[in-house]
């Protein structure tokens, strides 16, 4: 079992808190133990970040930051095998997924923001226009300062770097708190930062939990200038309260209950294939996954049969087995939660089209947290399995009869992260696309995501947008300078 340490001021250190086990969800066995940061460790990490901002890093040129971010991406690529092993040990996800999404997109996050640094600076300088009243106004960007980055367990490296890369691109220093379930890849990033010569204190990692632990200490820290968070809506609310003290800026990417709307005029085969991806990718543990499917009545039966066949064709298994197409849930606790929805859905009268149970793989993976991909029909819209985020490989499928009804059903949720729409009618795609209350809408595809586009949620799925220029807006302070002519 390896030890996972905090990374503070350029050094790996044990924290003053307790050691906690990091469990491999594919086996149910601990594969590492991590050192929890105590409040004093969080203080030291924030102080190191503050010192780094006062040093040369606070004055780095755009060109230097561009070079630094590209070097980080190259180093992640060079260490890809290590990152893959760490990510897979923490999450149990198949190599086919971690090797094509998690790790390469972790590196891509640094490359894309490196590329945008110069252009983003120009975007603001272009605003330098005389206002016609004898003054020249122009704006410059300055880093926010010390940014706290708090991330979840579902795509650990990808979602952590999604925030660290633009924060560094804008010249900030960061203190990161990865999920207690998946600390390994963030810890490994410290080695990358050392290898590329990022000054000590610019990138720090503290491990631990939320309340009463590193997460709460970090978000409450008065010397943190901004907080960026991805996770559950309830956690987001707690962090907003912490951010209110001292009026710190916050960006939050929260939970969802995403709808897929499938019209009878769609390419049925493509819609079934795409919906299988949108429902079951990463065992349903992607914030963008669809858990509510609305299908126009003439194709309802064919769609349900097609998606059932796709669900049953998924191959659960060991991460490094090349036949595996679906992994386990992240933890025993999360599996208990997901199975709770299996029970409430059955009690509410669902027809279980497929799945609805946990199972054990034979051999070494017997203790893994596996559940069957699950589809329900026949639930009322107010059933808990239809209203609440399950975050597992599940979806409820309901029929609809008109475009207006489909829009109303899809929008009848407190969440609004993503929606997916399947139709061959171009006008309908634009019309319904604009009517869906979500931050991200895909038409005839799912998770086709350019890192420069806006990412974030409506309603209780979050506050603000990140991605491309939106990230530059969050991770920098725009300063307007007015000169009297
Ligand atoms: P979570 O909210 O339980 O935890 C996320 C992080 O917050 C962890 O690092 C955790 O330790 C920390 N945390 C918990 N309580 C805290 C507190 N009081 N103060 C400070 N930090 C605290 O979420 P999770 O279970 O890790 O992830 C799953 C959730 O994340 C789902 O709801 C999913 O929809 C959401 N998610 C959203 C997006 C998005 O972009 N909108 C992306 C991925 C996941
Ligand atoms: C939320 O969980 C975000 C997912 C993003 C991606 O999978 C991606 O590749 O951009």
Image (cartoon, rainbow, N blue to C red):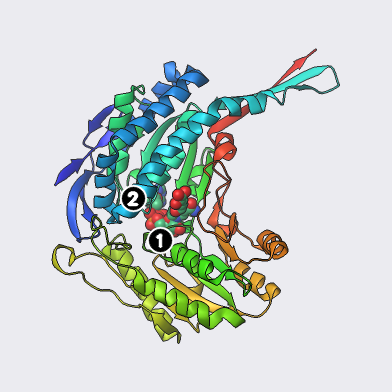
Q: Position of residue 390 (x, y in %)?
A: 42, 67
Furthest residue in direction bottom, as rendered:
349
Give the left or right position of residue 68, taking residue 481 as reference: left
Q: Is residue 34 above or below residue 10?
A: below
Disc 2 Cβ-to-ligand 2 distance below 8 Å: no
User: What number is the disc on residue 98?
Assistant: 2
Q: Quadrant of residue 440?
A: bottom right
Label 2 secondary element: helix
The front one of 320 and 381 is 320
Q: Residue at x 32, y 40 (%)?
A: 186
Q: Is residue 211 above or below residue 109?
A: below
Q: Residue at x 41, y 64 (%)?
A: 391
Local crowd size for mark 1, using a 10 Å CA cut-off: few (<14), some (14–19), many (≥20): many
Residue holding disc 1: 281
Q: Position of residue 93 (x, y in %)?
A: 30, 56
User: In the rendered view of the protein, which quadrant contains the C terminus?
Assistant: top right
Q: Position of residue 55 (x, y in %)?
A: 42, 17
Q: Is residue 37 among the parts visible in the rendering? A: no
Disc 1 Cβ-to-ligand 2 distance below 8 Å: yes
Label 1 secondary element: helix
Q: Earlier in the sequence, mark 2 or mark 1?
A: 2
Q: Residue at x 23, y 38 (%)?
A: 5
Q: Quadrant of residue 317?
A: bottom left
The front one of 481 and 280 is 280
The front one of 9 and 466 is 466
Measure the C-alpha gap from mark 2 to mark 1.
11 Å
């Amino acid at each position: 079992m390896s030890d996972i340490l905090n990374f503070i001021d350029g050094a790996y250190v044990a924290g003053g808190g307790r050691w906690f086990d990091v469990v491999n969800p594919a086996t149910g066995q601990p594969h590492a133990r991590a050192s929890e940061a105590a409040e004093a460790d969080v203080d030291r990490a924030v102080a190191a970040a503050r010192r780094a901002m006062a040093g040369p890093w606070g004055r780095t040129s755009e060109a230097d930051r561009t070079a630094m971010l590209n070097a980080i991406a190259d180093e992640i690529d060079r260490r890809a095998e290590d990152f893959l092993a760490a990510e897979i040990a923490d999450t149990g996800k198949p190599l086919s997924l971690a090797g094509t999404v998690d790790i390469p997109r972790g590196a891509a996050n640094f490359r894309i923001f490196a590329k945008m640094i110069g252009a983003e600076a120009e975007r603001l300088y272009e605003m330098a226009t005389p206002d016609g009243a004898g003054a020249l106004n122009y704006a410059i960007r300055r880093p926010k300062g010390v940014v706290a980055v708090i991330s979840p367990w579902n795509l650990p490296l990808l979602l952590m770097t999604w925030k660290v890369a633009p924060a560094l691109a804008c010249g900030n220093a960061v203190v990161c708190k990865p999920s207690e379930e998946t600390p390994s890849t963030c810890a490994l990033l410290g080695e990358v930062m050392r290898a590329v010569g990022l000054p000590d204190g610019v990138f720090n990692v503290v491990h631990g939990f939320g309340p009463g632990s590193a997460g709460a200490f970090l978000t409450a820290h008065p010397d943190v200038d901004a907080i960026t968070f991805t996770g559950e809506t309830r956690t987001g609310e707690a962090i907003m309260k912490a951010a209110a003290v001292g009026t710190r800026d916050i960006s939050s990417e929260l939970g969802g209950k995403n709808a897929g709307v499938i019209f009878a005029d769609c390419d049925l085969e493509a819609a079934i294939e795409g919906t299988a991806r949108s429902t079951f990718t990463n065992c349903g543990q992607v914030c963008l996954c669809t858990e509510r499917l609305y299908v126009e009545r003439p194709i309802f039966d064919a769609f349900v049969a097609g998606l059932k066949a796709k669900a049953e064709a998924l191959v659960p298994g060991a991460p490094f087995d090349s036949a595996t197409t679906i992994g386990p849930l992240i933890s025993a606790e999360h599996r208990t939660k997901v199975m709770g929805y299996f029970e409430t859905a059955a009690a509410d009268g669902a027809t279980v089209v497929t799945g609805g149970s946990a199972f054990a793989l034979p051999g070494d993976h017997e203790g893994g947290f596996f559940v069957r991909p699950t589809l329900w029909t026949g639930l009322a819209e107010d059933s808990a399995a239809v209203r609440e985020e399950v975050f597992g490989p599940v979806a409820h499928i309901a029929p609809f009869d008109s475009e207006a009804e489909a829009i109303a059903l899809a929008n009848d949720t407190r969440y609004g992260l993503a929606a997916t729409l399947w139709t061959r009618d171009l006008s309908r795609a634009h019309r319904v696309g604009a009517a869906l209350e979500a931050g991200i809408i895909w038409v005839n595809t799912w998770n086709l995501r350019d890192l420069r586009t806006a990412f974030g949620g409506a309603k209780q799925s979050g506050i603000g947008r990140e991605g491309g220029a939106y990230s530059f807006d969050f991770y920098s302070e725009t300063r307007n300078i007015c000169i009297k002519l």
